Amino acid sequence: MNQPPASEPALSAAVPRRGRLAKWLGGAALLAALLAVAAWQTRERWLAGIAQAWVVNDPVEAADAVMVLGGGAQFRSFEAVRLQRAGLAAKVLFPHIKPGPLETNAVVGNETELIERVLEHERIPATAREQIGRDVTSTRDEVLALRAWADRAHARVIIVPTDPFHTRRLKSLVRTHFAGSPTRVLVTVVDPPGYRWQEWWRDEHGFLAFQNELLKRLQSAFI
Amino acid sequence: MVDREAVSADAIVVSVGTSPELMQRALAWLHEGKASKLVLTRNLARPTDQAGITVPLAEHRRRELDAAGVPETAREFIGGDSRLLREELAVVRAWAATNHVKRILLPAEPLATRRVGWLARRMLGPAGIEPIVVPVPVAGYSVADWWRSKAGLMAMENEWALMAYYWWNY
């Protein structure tokens, strides 16, 4: 009976190993393809889910003050007015924002002044509005200014309405800079104009807003 | 960045909400005779405009054009509720079709030229309109060292993201 030469046992053992590897790779590729199809089919659900998981929206309750953050003359200030008129906040706070290069022209105008004009126009009395901080240039600066005011005023609750995807970063800053403070800061959502934040991927402003905040979050994690 | 020079065109197109630098460049081109008309696309009214707290951007621009001596015949405001570049370009396309316009000048921030040019060609090209997108330096960052400033970093990052968004959606 013919016996296989000495080299053939190694070769015949290698073929089943290669076959197993090919099967494994094929299986993995098929699984990946199925997962990709499933992800595509359910994309709207998990895209919306990501936004829901990201956005912070604390339940509103009666507060000592509501704060208008910088960049908010157009939407946040009106939300602050609504809350104040509804009796949910005794006072409206707004930051003294450091003028940027764009604010030297009449078209853009000064952000701090514009917020105050909105509050005046909406008949928020002078005694019910207060400018805080000096030359703020970031959300962090605003939170620090807010903490200083809260300590002076012995505030119990402050509401800060802001854009949906900004809420997470704001809440994180509040947790950091209000640590040890008896003041509770409620972060709430101001609905953006022109799109639903729950469907952020359908609108370029929503897409940009969310990915900007994701990047800032990543940046703060590494720097 | 796509670098092109301003050439003769039928019209110069800017948004009423454009930056001061782009507006100044558009006016300069008009005075240089690069085009006979300045077209301004109106944006969605701001809440402060609607409440009567601020002067609408279109009115600001109107006053600016009056001060710069631009005659009524050399300016035109079009559209009324554009929020996105795509919407503005659709308004421009419709206007250009009725006014037999074949070439337009579009000033744009340096890092935005590729995106604006891509979408403009996509939307206006099939209508026979040639958009010439020209970079205009703006305050906040320079193309040579955009990575050194927060504004430059944000602008570059936003442009990449928007370009991907446009490519996927449009």
Image: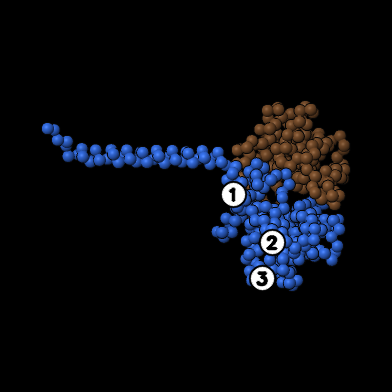
Location of residue A163 in the rendering, given as x and y in whole percent from the top left corner: 69, 53
Residue under the image location 86 percent in, 34 percent down: B73
Q: Which chain is brown?
A: B
Q: Does A87 sit above or below residue A21?
A: below
Alpha carbon separation for disc pair 1 and 2 = 21 Å
Instruction: Identify residue for label 2.
Output: A186
Q: Quadrant of residue B82?
A: top right
Disc 2: which chain?
A
Are circles 1 and 2 on residues that touch, CB within 8 Å?
A: no
For the N terminus of chain A, give its image quadrant: top left
Q: Is residue A200 left or right of residue B94?
A: left
Disc 3: which chain?
A
Residue under the image location 74 percent in, 61 percent down: A67
Of pointers 3 and 2, the one earlier in the residue sequence: 3
Q: Secondary structure at mark 3?
A: loop
For the C terminus of chain A, give its image quadrant: bottom right
Q: Secondary structure at mark 2?
A: strand
- Along the line of sight, which residue is nearer the eye, B136 or B86? B86
Q: Amino acid at mark 2?
A: Leu
Q: Secondary structure at mark 1?
A: helix
Residue under the image location 85 percent in, 44 percent down: B59
Instruction: Identify residue for label 1.
Output: A50
What number is the disc on residue A181? 3
Q: Is residue B168 left or right of residue B46?
A: left
Tell me the shade of chain A.
blue
Q: Quadrant of residue B169?
A: top right
Q: Quadrant of residue B132?
A: top right
